[in-house]
Amino acid sequence: MDLLFSEDAAPDDWSRFRAAGFGNTVCGFVHDRIRPTCGMPLGGVDTGCLDIEASGLLGLCTIFNSHVPRRGPINEPFLGMKVDGRTWLLTTVDFSRVADAVAWNPAAASAPTSHARRIRCWGHYPVLDLQFDTDAPVAVALRAWTPFVPGDLGASCMPAAVFEVHLRNQGDGHKQGLIALSFPGPTEAELGALPAVRQDVADDRLRGLAVSGERASYVLAALDAPGARVGGALGCDAGAWGRIDLALPTAAGGTGVSLAVPFTLRPGEEQVVRFILSWHSPRWFAAGHPDPQGRALLPYRAEPAGPGEDPRGATYTHMYALRYASAREVAGRLACRHEEILARVLRWQQAVYDEDALPVWLRDSLVNILHLLTETGFWAAARPPLGSWCRAEDGLFGLNEDPRHCPQIECVPCSFYGNYPLVYFFPELARSTLRGYNAYQFPDGQVAWIFGGTTGQPATLPLEMARPARGYQTTLNGPCVVDMVYRYWLCTGDEAGLRELYDLVKGATTFTMGLRPADGPDGVISFPAGNVGTEWFEACTWAGMAAHIGGIHLASLLQAEAVARLVGDGVFAQRCRAWFEQGRAAMEGKMWAGSYYLNYWEPQTGRRSDLVMANQLDGQWMAAMAGLDGVFAPERIQTVLQTVRHTCVAATAFGAVNFATSAGKPEANGGGLGTGYHPYAMFPPEVVMLGATYIYVGDHELGLELCRRCWANIARQGRTWDQPNIVRGDTGEIVYGGDYYQNLILWTLPAAIGGTDVAGPCRAGGLVRRVREAGEAAQGAR
């Protein structure tokens, strides 16, 4: 085995192999020739993140609160090694022509620099393993990781990363050398103002530097390396890297830091050099960026600042900053606990890799998809502008739809798709979000579409958490929240929480059922009167009764009925049952087209779509996940799925196109919001829902294959940590999106494969239960 993982791991594909720190084989996708479009993020819950690229460069960076737009990619090397008078920059990018005047001065004793010939990259969030191929006499690999332990929120919101450099002497003689790590630090805007305050860190375990300013601070320190030397950042200067044995740059008042640690290795000996990076940047601006230009940097036009208002908008405080007082505190804690925390990380990952009921590709993907929690998660402390409703222990947690493409907090359909890992692993965060929806519900019962952001009317700031808006997917916002409340209760058994949120469920359901009252039973499965608004497939034409929203309404009514009975409101439970029976009769009596359900039909105007919608049975999937009776006639479900298979599925090698004619020709279903979708468009989370629907009715092979095709297309384009929203089914091209947390829906597949409701994996022996148990700390270790 190489230093971190086996040489026989398949390149650019999923496989099983051995890896350091794991008791059994692991499942992974090792990037070799396929370069990821974004590096794997190092960061936990609410901490921001720092991307490490597979090329050995630093990538995008949000740890100092540059979120919209994100800082970077930084594109600087951060790791180098000097042995036998020669420096190897541990990147595949050749920086040998980027040097200062001294490096090019023939009189200067500047040593030559080389770069890695190849890097094999295995990411298993929150761990990134890079194995460097060089011609150096010392083999080198990097394991970079961050504390993220499902079930342990305290460890998972620790703002820090560990860089473990693994060395092995491959020669016959002793080797002495240096390992250097460099970090550029915050920008002037992120710091607050220059000069930075620089203070030595020197104690029994750590040797490094603390850098601080008005808004941000960090520590970069070597662990258990008393001979470490400290200097300014090395950046892209190959000459400076070449002189790391002589001197590190000076940086009085600057923000960057480098460390150089000496090592001595006997023949065949291995050694690990560890560095800790911790940070503390407690407040973010609603505009998403600390630059004084504020709104001017946004990719969209937000409402103007009011008189005397900071152009960056309101400020919010990270909850991690209430738990950890400083970067120095975090570094000290991690110095004491790094071995324990990493062991727990590898144990919970091993629990996933050992789940033989799941295919290899899915086991790897379940681990890596969790990176979206650090890319998109924000946890605000209970301080203004949040209202007095917000509890100190809760704060307000929200996920950002896609900070790089559609920045807004808690777009409700995105959380419907994607909050499953929160419910499974951090239910206190899911409860915090639901309490936000409860507080932000409008007096007429409509639920918030967003807590703030780009699609508000007017558009508000992208990281705003106290500006709820109604939005335009009016007919499905309520069912989204009802489903999220129900799944939270199923998985946690929190009856007090269910009672607390009952008015939210009841109000949302009553509002949804009142959107088209004049149509009687038909209105239960219809768009609002006047066909106002749209639905999840927002760039489409819709009218009247529709199979997709109709099925979702029916599933939501079953959930609302169940909640009402649980809290003892028999009257409302009966009302929900009556709505359900009326809506189901309309669906089966008026929408059945012989082998599928009509896309939509409005008898009053004659508007009708005969297109086959791939996801017309999403409501059936919702009911199955909730452990409730189905919403469509059982004898028709298999017929629909056969029709979808021969039309929408047959049209693409990458999943299922959204719509097709009954003859199998992909169609766009009109224009709707914006310019409409491409005829071959498809959404990864909807492919997962469709695949799970097949699995629930017994077609495991096709259901899993649809999901595999979709995720293989994403992985083979290097998008493991760059998750898309829209894909073209004819070419596989990624059309839109980069950090869409909708794709966390992948965590619903273990329940479907196991034939259980959403809570099945939480029960004894279930995958979620075993992951949480595997990651638990030894008694007294917390």
Image: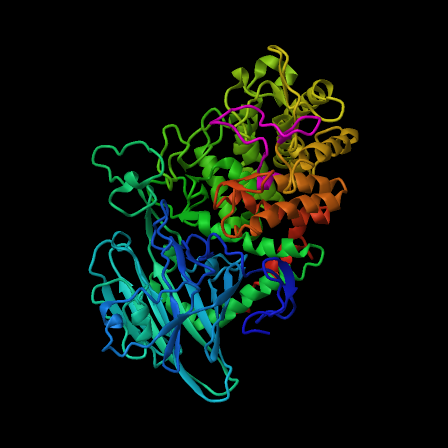
- Residue at image position (47%, 89%) is 173
Which residue is farthest front?
106
Which image quadrant for residue 86?
bottom left
Magenta stretch, main secondary structure class = loop
- Residue 782 in view (yes/no): no
Give the image quarter of residue 176.
bottom left
- For this orientation, the residue located farthest to the right is 635
Residue 511 in view (yes/no): yes
User: Foreground residue, 14 or 226?
Assistant: 14
User: Does residue 508 sit above or below 133 in this rendering?
Assistant: above
Q: Position of residue 479 (x, y in %)?
A: 57, 32
Outermost residue, bottom direction? 173
Residue at the spot 68% in from the left edge and 37% down from the top edge: 649
Q: Which residue is nearer to you in this view: 71 or 77?
A: 77
Q: Which residues are magenta?
A: 659-686
Residue at (66% x, 51% y) in the render = 761
Is residue 678 a member of the stretch shown in magenta? Answer: yes
Instruction: Please indicate whether residue 469 sits to the left or right of residue 417 in the image.
Output: left
- Residue 88 is inside the magenta segment: no
**x and y percentages locating residue 431 in the rendered image:** 51, 45
Colour mode of the rendering = rainbow
Q: Quadrant of the N terminus?
A: bottom right
Q: Is residue 591 above or below residue 316?
A: above
Q: Residue visible at 39% across and 82% down? A: 84
Residue 496 vertical position relative to residue 119 in the rendered view, above or below: above
Left or right, 504 with respect to 704, comes to left
Residue 97 x, y percent position in the rendering: 32, 65
Residue 491 in the image, given as x and y percentages of width and height: 61, 47
Of 22 and 723, which appears nearest the observer?
723
